[in-house]
Image: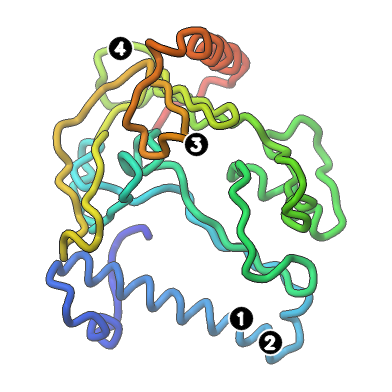
């Protein structure tokens, strides 16, 4: 959800027990959005187009924790528990999201895949669903359509770049904010911002964690299969793996166009 946060009064009234006004507003917005999507799906069904439709719904990032980066002090009542961090960081709480794909008669209903997928994959994947192929070669995205139809297939993506960029806000120099995923392993060359964890929803009526201290952390290595909350940095233990992933990040960075955060 992007600001401004607004919702009709009838949706706010659905959550009388939520004390945090920001959280109540956010919940009302999500409910209103659900109803709106339901109207679109209903229209597809009424016109006979639903059975020939592919409906994709996903988020581009985790929820923002207010106070970071500088100038973004609006509260969105976000909570990425149990994942670490939030929007504007490269922690899983800022980058890992869920997605929903519906394709009646093609994809298995109510099935789940945990295979690694990047947002760039949706372009070639949706083209493939329509029986088309990209006109250009060398795309960052990978066609995932076959693996969505057959969940028993081996993953087609084993590597993913989270980001590589130099922000405009002052960080007193240093390497770019960047991270790489290879299989279950994640290496963060650098990430800046809120690096903590929110409270479990049942522990607090307000699910907006305090931003805490802004942390500038470098050379962090995690096994996400064993440690999805990114609590144990293994960079000093798995030194060879950390070095290999750093070298790969540097290789990718050298082949990038110069793009600055705005």
Label 1 CA crowd tier, 10 Å (few <14, some 14–19, many 20+): some
The residue most toward the bottom is: 46
Q: Quadrant of the N terminus?
A: bottom left
Mark pair 3, 4: CA separation: 33 Å
Query: Counting residues from the N terminus, which is met first, the one under dot 2 or under dot 3?
Result: 2
Helix, strand or loop for disc 4: loop
Question: Nearer the viewer's eye, disc 3 or disc 4?
Answer: 3
Residue 175 or 167: which is nearer the viewer?
175
Question: Dot 4 corresponds to which residue?
Answer: 173
Q: Residue at x 69, y 91 (%)?
A: 46
Query: Counting residues from the N terminus, which is met first, the one under dot 1 or under dot 4?
Result: 1
Question: Dot 2 corresponds to which residue?
Answer: 45
Left or right, 67 with reference to 247: left
Query: Counting residues from the N terminus, which is met first, the one under dot 1 or under dot 3?
Result: 1
Question: Dot 3 corresponds to which residue?
Answer: 225
Please provide percent x and percent y for residue 141: 69, 39
Label 2 CA crowd tier, 10 Å (few <14, some 14–19, many 20+): some
In the rendered view, would you say 6 is above or below 77? below
Mark pair 1, 4: CA separation: 49 Å
Helix, strand or loop for disc 3: loop
Residue 2 or 116: which is nearer the viewer?
116
Query: Counting residues from the N terminus, which is met first, the one under dot 2 or under dot 4?
Result: 2
Label 4 CA crowd tier, 10 Å (few <14, some 14–19, many 20+): few
């Amino acid at each position: 959800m992007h600001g401004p946060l607004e919702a009709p009064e009838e949706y706010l009234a659905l959550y009388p027990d939520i004390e945090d006004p920001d959280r109540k507003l956010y919940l009302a917005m999500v409910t209103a959005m659900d109803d709106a999507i339901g109207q679109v799906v209903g229209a597809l069904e009424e016109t006979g187009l639903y059975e020939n439709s592919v409906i994709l719904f996903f988020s581009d990032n985790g929820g923002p924790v207010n106070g970071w980066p500088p100038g973004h002090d609006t509260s969105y009542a976000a909570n990425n528990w149990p994942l670490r961090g939030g929007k504007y960081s490269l922690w899983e709480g800022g980058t890992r999201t869920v997605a929903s794909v519906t394709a009646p008669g093609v994809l298995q209903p109510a099935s789940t895949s945990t295979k690694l997928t990047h947002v760039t994959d949706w372009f070639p994947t949706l083209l493939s669903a329509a029986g088309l192929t990209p006109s250009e070669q060398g795309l960052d995205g990978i066609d995932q359509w076959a693996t969505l139809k057959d969940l028993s297939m081996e993953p087609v993506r084993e590597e993913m770049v989270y980001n590589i960029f130099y922000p405009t806000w002052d960080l007193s120099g240093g390497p770019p904010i960047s991270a790489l995923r290879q299989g279950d392993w994640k290496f963060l060359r650098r990430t800046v911002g809120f690096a903590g964890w929110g409270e479990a929803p049942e522990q607090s009526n307000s699910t907006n964690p305090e931003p805490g201290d802004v942390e500038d952390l470098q050379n962090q290595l995690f096994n996400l299969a064993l440690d999805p909350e990114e609590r144990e940095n293994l960079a000093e233990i798995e030194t060879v793996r950390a070095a290999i992933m750093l070298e790969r990040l540097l290789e990718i960075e050298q082949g990038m166009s110069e793009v600055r955060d705005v």
